Amino acid sequence: MATIFADLHQASKKTETEQNMTIIQNSLSSHLDNDDDEDEKTAGALPGAMMTKFLEARTIMIFGGVDQKLAERVSTQLLYLDHLNNDPIKIFVNSPGGHVESGDTIHDLISYISSPVAVIGTGWVASIATHIFLGVAPERRFCLPNTRFLIHQPSGGSRGKASDIAIQAEEIVKMRTRIAEKIAEATGQSLERVLKDIDRDYWMSTTEAKEYGILGTVINSASEVKF
C-alpha cells in the first residue's frame, strides 16, 4: 500500500509540460499507428514510437514528397512544440519537392511561431522543399556536405475546358513570380536573375548554393548547428 501511495505522489509531481508531452506523444502515436499500413508501403518510413522520440528532441523530419499529409504533420509538430516552450527546433529536409501550397504552409508557420528554427538539408533539397529551407534566416540554414539544391518554376498539368486551362496557366504564372520573389528576398539575388534561373532546372552544389545565398553553412556534426 505504501508503494502505491508513493507512486501516486510521484505521479502528481509531473510538470504540466511533461503531462502535455505525454498527451501529444500518445496522440501522435495513435495518429501514426492508424497510418501504419500505408506507411509500411513507403521505403524508409519511421514508426510512430520513433517519431515521438524525435519530437521529444524538438526535431522534425521532412523526408520525401511534400503533400497535404506531410504539411499537416509538420504543422502540428511545429505548433505544439512552440506551445510547450520557445526552445530551438531543428528541421531536417531531404525532399524532391511536391505540392506548392503544402510547402507554403510549412514555410509560413516557421516564421509564425516564436521558437527559433534551424533547417538542416541532407541528400537533396529541391523545388518547394527549397522554399521551405528558405523559411529561416541565412545563419540558420545548414546542410550536410553531400547535399544538392534545386530551384525551378512550378509546373502543373492543366485539364478541362479551354477557359479553365487558361485560368490555371495564369495562376501558374502568378505562382512562378511569387516563388521567384521569395527566393530573391531570401538570397539577395535580383528578381530578374531568379526569374531567368528558374526558367529551367537550376541545380547547385553546396558551394554554389552558398554563393547564391540559399545556404548558410555546411556542417559535419550536430555540434555545429547554432541558433
Image (spheres, rainbow, N blue to C red):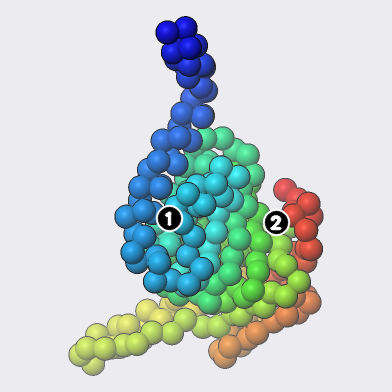
Q: Residue at x 49, y 25 (%)?
A: 16
Asked which secondary structure carries label 1, the reply is helix
Q: Residue at x 41, y 35 (%)?
A: 23
Using the rendered image of the protein, determine whether residue 180 is visible from the camera's viewpoint: no
Q: Tell me: residue 95, above or below residue 110.
A: below
**Numbered mark located on residue 73 in the image:** 1
| Residue 38 locus on image (x, y percent) | 35, 66
Q: Could you say which quadrant of the image residue 146 lies in?
A: bottom right
| Residue 107 locus on image (x, y percent) | 52, 60
Q: Residue at x 49, y 60 (%)?
A: 46
**Numbered mark located on residue 9 in the image:** none
Q: Tell me: residue 135, above or below residue 24.
A: below
In front: 217, or 112? Answer: 217
Q: Could you say which quadrant of the image residue 201 lies in?
A: bottom right
Q: Residue at x 45, y 35 (%)?
A: 22
| Residue 189 locus on image (x, y percent) | 69, 75
Residue flagged by tag 1: what amino acid is it?
Arg
Give the label, 2 or 1, closer to the camera.
Answer: 1
